[in-house]
Image (cartoon, rainbow, N blue to C red):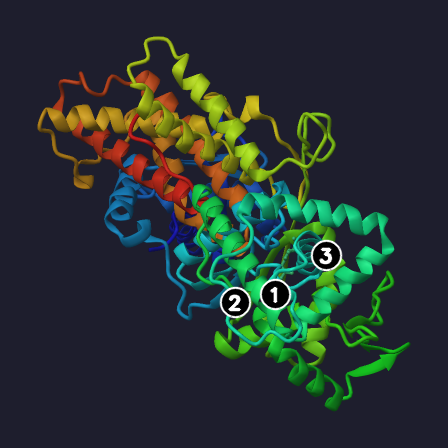
Amino acid sequence: MEKLLDLVSEEMKQAFEAAGYDGGLGKVTPSNRPDLCEYQCNGAMAGAKQYKKAPMAIAQDVVNALGESKVFAEAGAVNPGFLNLKLNPAFVRNYLERMAQAEKFGLEMPEHPKKIVIDYGGPNVAKPLHVGHLRSAIIGESVKRIARYAGHEVTGDIHLGDWGLQMGLIITELRERQPDLLYFEDNYEGEYPAEAPFTISELEEIYPTASAKSKEDAAYKEKAMDATFKLQSGVRGYRALWKHIMDVSVADLKKNYKNLNVEFDLWKGESDVHDLIPAMVEEMKKGGYAYLSEGALVVDVKEETDTKEVPPCMILKSDGASLYNTTDLATIMDRMDKINPDEIIYVVDKRQELYFEQVFRCARKTKLVRPETELKFLGFGTMNGKDGKPFKTREGGVMRLESLLEEINGEMYRKIMSQENRTMPEGEAGETAKIVALSAVKYGDLSNQASKDYIFDIDRFTSSEGDTGPYILYTIARMKSILGKYAETGGKTDAAALQPASGASEKDLMLQLAGFNAMMEGAYAETAPHKVCSYIYDLANAFNRFYHETKILTEEDRTKKEGWIALLALTRDVLETCIGVLGFSAPDRM
Ligand code: ARG
């Protein structure tokens, strides 16, 4: 279905042509002066030179040519030559009815859907999730849902960090503590136990301990590096231990992501491409791309136009060990092989930007991807505390994801329980608090442009007023409550009952709704969930203004009432669709 603005521009184009001017001048944009008009067209001014005519005269010609337009209720030529426009309420009403009845509110589907892989989440196995991983999960999930809604074929891959030094550190620490474990017996050839020799909470303690030791004790670090190497080269006992670490840790990760309403299609990791590395390296050598430099195997990726130094991409260290790069490159190769995507989007901390620039260049140069495959880096900024420094616990440690969510859930629960005239029983309040808390965290994050740093402010994020998730949910709950009461009286909801707006706030709400398609297209094209947030904030505000001026349920004129109900239902549906792509949902009441 065409976007509203395109229909409006088309009408204007025809008027320009009918008046004898170039139709291309008839471009309509939202008004810069919403107090004066809804839309505007500056074509008369743009055409003045070409036609050697005063802009006002052209504008007046166009107004005359418009005549009794079905699209515009008002079109005025104003100095120095603007066309100020207001839409015909009946035209808007008809547009909304078509929207309500169309699939996805009439959002146009791509002729050739793209295959897209989104690499997000990126937690490191056996290391606790921290708030940086929170951002990747929240943004990536939303980017995935938006692209899917826009009609593309999207695969979300968690890309676990499961192959690096942290694994060697854990194995080393386990060996220090339990040297007699079967896994460390060199000549053991039998089966290993099915049970892991540790629990998730032990694992979470082991990693930081080992990591701290390795920073102080060079010999310990050496052992950890050796253990990593042994693991990667396939020593049986090490692989078996690794498998235990994976099982215990992944089960815990799954629980955490479920609480965040984040779902991955693929749970692949760095380890999955380990076996592909030798062949990849061979190809890179054969192609003449990779060469030895001080013992290490590298590929040059600098370009003439670079203004800053872009170091070579290191493929293998001098001891033959692979690196973070190597697994990322092999993963690209694997994705091309299995999925053959048109685009891969990486949702990663923006501090890794240069790194990804190297990887992308290397992948292109060594022809791991098709020339037209897009590799996109969506770098996000830091989540800061109120002091403007990276978010920490009260004690100054790294804030763990679980603790952060607990804190927000608690705060939300307190707010719900302390509501005056609360009718919600405690059990339901607990559940509702979780749903609302998730909206607070996700909206608080997504409403900022991803690349910017932002301040995580529990108080503000959980407030039911202002530009927040809970405010949006309150607005939806309000609509649901009205629609519920209406349904109880046996009333029917039908988009055909929509009426042309009779007042300003109603018209404004209708125009907001009509902008859905253009907004969603933009949010997809620019991988910009914040566009969805600012849209629903405006939409919720437009609805609340309308709601405060209108007694819906007590209206006696049935036509009016049914029209409003249809408007309410459409607003609710659009809002719920939008929060759906942002990755949260609304409770029925709050
Ligand atoms: N595991 C990494 C980290 O915690 C993030 C992974 C990002 N994705 C990637 N394909 N490298 O920093």
Disc nearest the viewer among 3 and 1: 1
Considering depth in this image, is 218 or 367 the residue closer to the camera? 218
Could you say whether the residue bearing mark 2 is in a helix, strand or loop?
A: loop
What numbered label is drawn on residue 183? 1
Q: Which mark is residue 192?
A: 2
Q: Residue at x 81, y 56 (%)?
A: 220
How many numbered circles are shown? 3
**Observer-nearest of 578 and 214:** 214
Image location of residue 67, percent across then percent down:
34, 43
Q: Report whether residue 79 is seen.
A: yes
Q: Read off the residue under disc 3.
A: 353
- Residue 1 vs 313, above or below: the answer is above
- Classify mark 1: helix, strand or loop: helix
Return the x and y of residue 114 as percentages of the image width and height.
Answer: 46, 68
What amino acid is labelled 1 in the image?
Tyr
User: Would residue 97 be found to the left or right of residue 324 on screen?
Assistant: left
159 above or below 508?
A: below
- Residue in view at x 44 percent, y 41 percent: 259
Mark pair 2, 3: CA separation: 42 Å
Is 354 or 523 nearer to us in this picture?
354
Residue 79, percent from left and from top: 56, 33
The residue shown at (35%, 39%) is: 576
- The spot of residue 329 in percent (x, y) is 66, 72
